[in-house]
Amino acid sequence: MKSRVPALALAAVGNALIAWAAPAQKSLVTSSLQAATAATPDYIIIGGGLAGLTVANRLSEDPSINVLVIEAGGDNRTSVMINTVSTYSEAFGTSLDWDWQTTQQVGGSTKNIKGGKTLGGSSSINGAAWTRGATEQYDALEQLGNEGSLQPYFVKSEHFYSPNEAQKALGAGMANNVHGTSGPISASYTPANSGNQRRMYTDAYGDKFLQAASNALGLRHITDICNGDIHGTGATTPNSITPSSQVQQLRSSAATGYISPIEYSRSNIKVLVGWRGVKALFQDAQNPTRVTGAVLQQSKNGAQQNVTAKKAVIVAAGAIRSPQFLELSGIGDSNIIEPLGIKTVVDLKGVGRNLQDQTMNTIGAAIKSDFQGSGPSSTIAYPTIWQLFSNASAVKTHLEKNYDTYAAQIVAAGGAVSADAVKAQWKIQTDLLWNKNTSASELFADHGFPSGQFGQDTWPLLVYSRGSVHISENNAFHHASVDPGYYRLPIDMDVNVATLRTARRLYQTSPLQETLNSEQVPGFGKVPNSGQYGSYADWQKWILKGYVPVSHQLGTCQMAPQSLGGVVDSSGRVYGVDAGSLRVVDASILPMQFSAHLSSSLYAIAEKFADSIKNSS
Ligand SMILES: Cc1cc2nc3c(=O)[nH]c(=O)nc-3n(C[C@H](O)[C@H](O)[C@H](O)COP(=O)(O)OP(=O)(O)OC[C@H]3O[C@@H](n4cnc5c(N)ncnc54)[C@H](O)[C@@H]3O)c2cc1C
Ligand SMILES: *[C@@H]1O[C@H](CO)[C@@H](O)[C@H](O)[C@H]1NC(C)=O
Ligand SMILES: *[C@@H]1O[C@H](CO)[C@@H](O)[C@H](O)[C@H]1NC(C)=O
Ligand SMILES: *[C@@H]1O[C@H](CO)[C@@H](O)[C@H](O)[C@H]1NC(C)=O
Ligand SMILES: *[C@@H]1O[C@H](CO)[C@@H](O)[C@H](O)[C@H]1NC(C)=O
């Protein structure tokens, strides 16, 4: 999707870091089933991605507990496509990316959703933007049943590096009492130095972009995007990268943060790569909903292997694949799984529904002179719904008047168990957007993309459409049916058009206007600059033709009351399964999006769930 600067020299640095911890003992990462299952695990974790590795590390802090992680992908920590963020996007479409093709979407096309198929999961291929949502969004999670604050877990997961004077001068800050400084995941601002050293993810226009947003919209500048108060703000944002004197682009992922440091020192944890979790195993007739282990398989035609778990199986395969694991296990809507020859163990209608992702469109304007830096900038503007629409009240009235019609549409499309279920979410969402002014869209300044331009990657943050993912065959190697329902409801297109009009407006506002040449993408030829920065019909046509998934998929095993389509309780225990012997912890449990990139929140949630599992056993 994007071309980045190759950073050949950096691969060597990555290798050196990994070799530096060199082994007295064998690596806990293995592709040998025999080595991985030498001891009977207490916990089997399905998926060695962001959440799975976080939980695995914490559970194995107790040396008497044995943990086995199953990861479908390989261990690619030393690959330059993984370990350097400056080459972000080179992993897309390779064997390191699941690259799930969707069903046909509104507008007629299919899209490809990305997800890391490698140790560390999507944290190994993501864009490394490190942001948090608004405080009231985490409070809303508590309203939906997630007891207890996430704040201590944000602190626990994070090693935040305070900006230096030069970075501070560019607008970077570190808010008091919100950050951790000794956790496994490094977060830091990119360097502010210039001269002949490239300033990755910083640029000459970021400050002008934020000033234009302030002039056009009244957007406030904040120095720390993780401070919980992001309403109508813009900021220079940190990245999940490890700072170092020469190299600023080394990725900090679940693999490097939660596995590398313990790789040669803990003997009670194994990570088996190149194998898939197929389904859960259950006890006999006496206790048919007690999970006793998992079935593993290495290839489509390979033999299936049973592995026992003394305490629990924890599903962390991500929002697209965790519901598949449950359905293959017999946990899901019986009307969907029984026709595929799967016996229902728990008829749980919410499994696989409530899929939510966002959609991105990038606009660009040509630069007047060459600039320092490469890659996208780390400057984000987060307008509120009031800043996007001059008639925001009318938009709200119209939306609420249509709740019943829209809910019926979502239920008919399989995106929710009931109209009440999806309306309960929308009420929270509308309250956040219109009453609490929680940021409605992201405008992510992108320096050098589109090629040679100053771009804005834009997306509405809290979508109203809902979709689904379900298996279509009784087989863990068969592609599931993935329908994110992009633009299923007109409100999502309305917010998207308003977002792009706003982005275009920023190009026409001082001081960005003087700094840039004219808009090239889409340009006034494709979307004439009529009336309000382009007509609705022209923008809609352009959006549907070119949008790409943001790949922030979530919601498919949501943490909510079962009556509202919930699949897990506030500790991640799957409803209807005995004694917490099957849990889910990953992006699938989030009921709704945050006004943020997801990873920092997911690390915190995984930390919290790990604590809750430890305390319950
Ligand atoms: C392209 C892209 C860009 C992103 N950019 C950002 C960003 O800039 N900032 C940010 O904060 N967030 C970003 N995100 C989001 C964030 O990285 C993800 O939301 C997060 O990693 C999801 O965590 P997870 O634990 O749910 O799943 P993942 O981290 O995806 O982990 C799931 C793991 O399970 C494995 N797996 C799947 N099925 C099986 C099976 N049956 N058996 C065994 N293993 C299995 C997968 O291979 C994978 O390793 C991005 C995501 C993507 C895809
Ligand atoms: C990822 O690692 C696996 C081994 O764990 C290897 O087989 C595969 O080739 C690697 N992929 C890439 C793209 O480096
Ligand atoms: C795995 O367990 C299932 C259910 O108990 C059983 O039917 C199957 O034969 C076992 N497979 C192997 C290879 O042991
Ligand atoms: C709000 O304004 C937009 C842009 O002018 C217009 O297209 C839309 O119909 C209006 N919405 C309502 C509900 O009035
Ligand atoms: C939200 O923004 C609107 C428009 O700027 C303003 O009238 C309102 O007071 C704000 N509400 C809150 C809670 O900040």
Image: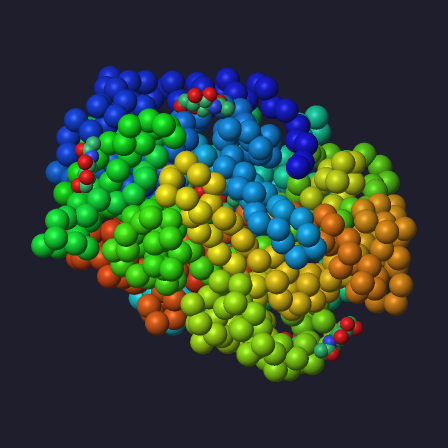
Q: Position of residue 447 (x, y in %)?
A: 71, 41
Q: Could you say which is closer to the camera, residue 458 or residue 230?
A: 458
| Quadrant field for ligand 4 | bottom right
The image shows residue 519, relative to residue 417, as above or below, that is above
Image quadrant in which you'd find residue 485: bottom right
Q: Could you say which is closer to the camera, residue 587 or residue 101?
A: 101
Write the residue at 72% across / 39% down: 449
Q: Position of residue 532 (x, y in %)?
A: 84, 67
**In the displayed structure image, the side of residue 225 where residue 57 appears, left or right:** left
**In the displayed structure image, the side of residue 469 where residue 164 appears, left or right:** right
Q: How is the image coloured?
A: rainbow
Write the residue at 81% across / 49% down: 522
Q: How many marks?
A: 0
Q: Is residue 89 visible?
A: yes
Write the residue at 40% across / 56% down: 336
Image quadrant in which you'd find residue 486: bottom right
The image shows residue 531, relative to residue 298, as above or below, that is below
Q: Could you say which is closer to the camera, residue 540 or residue 253?
A: 540
Q: Residue furthest left?
A: 286
**In the displayed structure image, the side of residue 211 where residue 115 appears, left or right:** left
Q: Is residue 56 visible?
A: no
Q: Could you say which is closer to the camera, residue 362 or residue 305?
A: 305
Q: Position of residue 375 (x, y in %)?
A: 66, 36
Tell me the quarter of the image containing the N terminus. top right
The image shows residue 108, relative to residue 591, as above or below, that is above
The image shows residue 55, relative to residue 499, as above or below, that is above
**In the displayed structure image, the side of residue 233 where residue 21 appears, left or right:** left
Write the residue at 35% across / 72% down: 563
Q: Position of residue 471 (x, y in %)?
A: 42, 48
